[in-house]
């Protein structure tokens, strides 16, 4: 049996850990609120961007001169996986569930004989994926130095992707991130961004009841500007959703860690008291038997 | 006087939403004014100054680029970045212009250089306008 001092030390250390996890939970809760607000604030832009894009794309889609970013290269040999994860750990299964989704997809593609390239946004995803796909990872984008996530960051990532696409490095690009559903539910999601999957039904509906637009400059020129920006918007949205998901995951992970620490303290306190009582009893017996022997 | 709905959104947030009388938009192929019942149009924006008139108030905003869409519901502008003219930091702006100049010098192809030169010209025009604007205000 452990000595009283040892038990006391152990309880003290669990208490210190509990304090830390409790603090992390509260910090995550505060950050979550901010991240959620940012994600909501970005929604109108993405929605309107989608609407305009669907509108124009519906018109240009049939034409031969449609930009490659919209129509694709016509092949699906080389797949680019853009895996967005967080920079920090201690957030439950957040990073590993995104990485697992990406890994499953990569394995499925490799089994079909396709080439897979991976860009990791965020260090944690890279740490997980490099064990298996070290030679497939072409770039790691580090956002650790970024304090508040801005559109500029997403734009930079989008520009890198477009540059690679135009250099013919891949045919299809899929974005992996975690959709924020609620504090306790984050859904790892795969979304194809090149060529974009347009909401077909919406495009048709828009085609029937919206008036004929005038374009200034021409449709294809607008499209050429719109598509990279749409890509940036998608990446931006994924990053924001990810930020909210990360904080949500961290909050619930830290909540259960705090609870576990509480349980452990309770159990150890009981052991501590039992040991203490056992020692007292033992001492009493010694005294009494000593007295009786006289 | 008839009014129409105007929304200004940036990737980060909804900047403005409300009824206005008139909006002057810096379109890629020239400025145009949107009034109620304007014909549906989609246009790209160049860096320039967006003027919004609502009631007797006139607001001027600097936009860095984006899209404008006019439909029967009103005008929507997707701006990359929009700042009230009074809040534009001229030193920062000048720095971004010279940074762009440096980038132009390193442009990879003639086509890119031509495009960048055009943007640079527009940026400089805005700079002059802004400079004039602040000067007149004092």
Image (spheres, coloured by chain):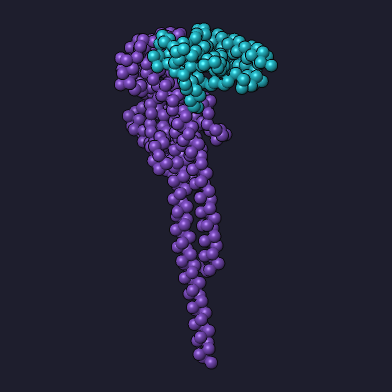
Chain colours: A purple, B cyan
Instruction: Identify the image quadrant of residue B2.
Output: top left
Image coordinates for residue A181, horizontal then vertical, percent:
39, 37
The mark total stands at 0
Up/down of A28 relative to A288, above or below: above
Front residue of this view, candidates B63 and A21: B63
Instruction: Identify the image quadrant of residue B129.
Output: top right
Q: Residue at x 33, y 12 (%)?
A: A62
Q: Residue at x 47, y 21 (%)?
A: B18
Which residue is situated farthest in the bottom direction here?
A294
Front residue of this view, candidates A140 and B117: B117
Q: Residue at x 47, y 70 (%)?
A: A274
Instruction: Identify the image quadrant of residue B131.
Output: top right
Which residue is situated farthest in the front direction here?
B1
Front residue of this view, candidates A109 and B78: B78
Could one spot residue A192 in this view of the protein? yes
Could one spot residue B9 in this view of the protein? no
In this picture, residue A28 sits left or right of residue A104: right
Up/down of A219 relative to A260, above or below: above
Q: Residue at x 55, y 33 (%)?
A: A148
Front residue of this view, candidates B60 and B29: B60
Image coordinates for residue A210, horizontal then vertical, percent:
34, 14
Image coordinates for residue A177, horizontal then vertical, percent:
42, 33
Image coordinates for residue B25, horizontal then vertical, percent:
51, 12
């Amino acid at each position: 049996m452990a000595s009283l001092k040892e038990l006391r030390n152990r309880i003290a250390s669990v208490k210190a850990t509990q304090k830390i996890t409790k603090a992390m939970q509260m910090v995550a809760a505060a950050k979550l609120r901010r991240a959620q607000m940012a994600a909501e604030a970005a929604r109108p832009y993405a929605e309107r961007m989608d609407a305009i894009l669907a509108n124009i794309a519906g018109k240009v889609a049939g034409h031969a001169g449609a930009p490659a970013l919209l129509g694709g290269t016509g092949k699906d040999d080389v797949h680019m996986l853009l895996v967005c994860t967080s920079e920090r750990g201690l957030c439950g299964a957040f990073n590993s569930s995104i990485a697992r989704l990406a890994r499953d997809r990569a394995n499925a593609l490799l089994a079909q004989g396709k080439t897979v390239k991976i860009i990791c946004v965020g260090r944690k995803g890279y740490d997980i994926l490099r064990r298996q796909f070290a030679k497939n990872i072409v770039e790691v984008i580090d956002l650790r130095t970024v304090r508040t996530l801005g559109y500029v960051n997403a734009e930079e990532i989008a520009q890198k992707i477009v540059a690679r696409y135009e250099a013919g490095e891949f045919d299809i690009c899929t974005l992996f991130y975690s959709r924020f559903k609620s504090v306790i539910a984050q859904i790892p999601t795969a979304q194809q961004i090149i060529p974009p999957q347009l909401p077909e039904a919406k495009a048709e509906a828009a085609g029937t009841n919206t008036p004929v637009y005038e374009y200034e400059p021409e449709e294809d020129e607008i499209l050429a500007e719109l598509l990279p920006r749409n890509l940036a918007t998608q990446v931006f949205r994924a990053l924001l959703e990810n930020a909210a998901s990360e904080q949500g995951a961290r909050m619930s992970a830290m909540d259960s860690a705090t609870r576990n620490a509480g349980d452990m303290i309770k159990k150890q306190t009981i052991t501590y008291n039992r040991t203490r009582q056992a020692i007292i009893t033992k001492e009493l017996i010694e005294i009494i038997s000593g007295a009786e022997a006289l | 006087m008839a009014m129409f709905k105007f929304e200004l959104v940036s990737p980060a947030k909804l900047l403005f939403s409300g009824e206005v009388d008139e909006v002057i938009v810096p379109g890629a192929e020239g400025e145009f004014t949107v009034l109620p019942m304007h014909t549906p149009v989609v246009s790209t924006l160049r860096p320039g100054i967006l003027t919004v008139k609502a009631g007797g108030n006139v607001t001027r905003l600097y936009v860095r680029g984006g899209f404008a869409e006019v439909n029967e519901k009103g005008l929507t502008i997707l701006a990359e970045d929009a700042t009230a003219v009074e809040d534009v930091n001229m030193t920062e702006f000048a720095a971004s212009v010279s940074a762009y100049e440096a980038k132009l010098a390193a442009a990879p192809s003639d086509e890119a250089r031509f495009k960048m030169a055009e943007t640079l010209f527009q940026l400089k025009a805005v700079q002059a306008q802004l400079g004039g604007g602040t000067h007149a205000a004092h």
